[in-house]
Amino acid sequence: MKSFTVLLCLFATVSHAALAEGWSLWSPREEAKPEGVVSETGGHGGKGALILETGEGEQWIGCWTRTLPVEGGKHYQFSAWKKASAMPTARRSVYARILWQDENGKNVTWEEPAKQGYAKGSVPRAEPEYPKVTDGEANEWVHCESTLRAPVKARQAKIELYLQWAPNARVEWSDVALAAVPPPAPRKVRLATIHLQPKEGKNPADKPPQYAPLIAEAAQQKADLVVLGETLTYYGTGKTMAECAESVPGPSTEYFGRLAKEHGLYIVAGLVEREGKTLYNTAALLGPDGALVGKYRKVTLPRGEIEHGITPGHDYPVFDTRFGKVGMMVCYDGFFPEVARALTIHGAEVIAWPVWGCNPMLAAARACENHVYIVSSTYTDSSKSQWMISGIFDHYGDVLAKADVFGTLAIAEVDLNEPAHWNSLGDFKAQIQSHRPPALKE
């Protein structure tokens, strides 16, 4: 193989001669193997590149691969630059993969027992890792970077850089690195939900104060995020949704903003929003500075809200907070996988969910199919129904905590930097980008 200068570092700087060794081109079928080219002058910064190119047809699948020594139990930062041509679905065609192996090139297991899907106490295999590969624009250099932990039994890492399923396509990989790094600090966050039917009063302004004592209690338990109910200023008023509508920001967000600032936390409140002649079912996120961080307008509307004259939203915003990225959905959104998936694709780590009622199995599905924490706040009486709960769902769809009695709250602490490893799939969330299907064409 020709000499090239793609930077590959591990622990220390390696020589030019070492850079020329170890890379090979692999494909499961010779007739589907892309053409591999080593460029000494290409790449990001002109220091060299590993190139894959395809011709006509969609059959192509192949990768540049190299195996490097690692020390089990340590963390490693994978980084690379890549530039890809235009292709039908680049995220499915261009990706990186890392396999953890023992000294003989065999797959290793994780050290901890399985959580799901295997016999109690069994230890699952360490499945391939999928470092984050940013899409970017066609023919522009994009930097890719992820921190991964090697299983204790791992002695080497096999790096794979792919191009597949795209006709007449080209990708350059350069400055590929796998370097030992300190373990990332935990990102622990305390998520809380309030289980309350705000029955007192017949006016919208009567409703927000009923949450104040429970928000104070959540603050005493060091909550970072507190989720309240859906359209809470409408609940139990006997009025129409239009009569309960208000601007966002407006009086209710000002009230909850003061509480958020007083207690130094984030609050999500469900409201009926009016913007001119248009009404929305909205979830508002208030920050510890008292300001409106952002809002989400419910996209999927049940027939009752349509009959009230509500208009659907169109966007799936995700907001930065001091602890991570938060998305919101509202009630009926949970019946449809597209909403939680869109929020996850946009980076949500936690989804706040004011929900009048829903099937809790759907809540578990939305959480586990996206590896995202979901915090629901409902008006359903869990003692009389197997319908919705006010709770915190984890990456496996399990309920970490729930509030069974009205006028109480549930709280759970999670680490947003701790990936969940599914049996037979590994870190599924990392695979969503490259494995999810192309968007439906309507």
Image (spheres, rainbow, N blue to C red):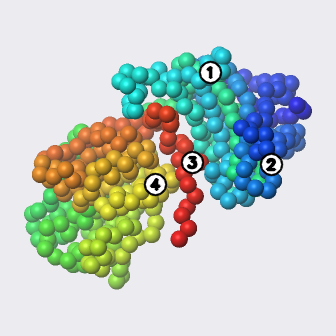
Of mark 3 and mark 1, the one earlier in the sequence is 1
Q: Which residue is mark 3?
A: 435
Q: Secondary structure at mark 3?
A: helix
- 148 versus 70 height, above or below: below
Q: Nearer the viewer, residue 87 or 211?
A: 87
Q: Nearer the viewer, residue 179 or 405?
A: 405
Image quarter of the N terminus: top right
Q: Secondary structure at mark 1?
A: loop
Picture quadrant where residue 162 is located:
top right
Q: Which residue is mark 1?
A: 106
Q: Residue 62 vs residue 132: left or right?
A: right
- Give, as a three-letter code, the residue at label 1: Lys
Q: Nearer the viewer, residue 47 or 113?
A: 113
* Residue 229 locus on image (x, y percent): 24, 58
The 10 Å Cα crowd at callout 2, few under 14, some 14 to 19, many 20 or more, is many
Tell me, yes or no, whether the two marked residues, 3 and 1, touch with CB atoms within 8 Å. Answer: no
Of mark 4 and mark 2, the one earlier in the sequence is 2
Tell me, yes or no, whether the two marked residues, 3 and 2, touch with CB atoms within 8 Å. Answer: no
Q: Which residue is mark 2?
A: 53
Q: Which residue is mark 4?
A: 341
Residue displayed at 37% across by 67% down = 300
**CA separation in Å, label 2 and label 1:** 30 Å
The 10 Å Cα crowd at callout 4, few under 14, some 14 to 19, many 20 or more, is many
Of mark 3 and mark 2, the one earlier in the sequence is 2
The answer to whether one can see residue 67 in this image is yes
Residue displayed at 53% across by 47% down = 432
Q: Nearer the viewer, residue 102 or 291?
A: 102
Residue displayed at 49% across by 23% down = 110
**CA separation in Å, label 3 and label 2:** 21 Å
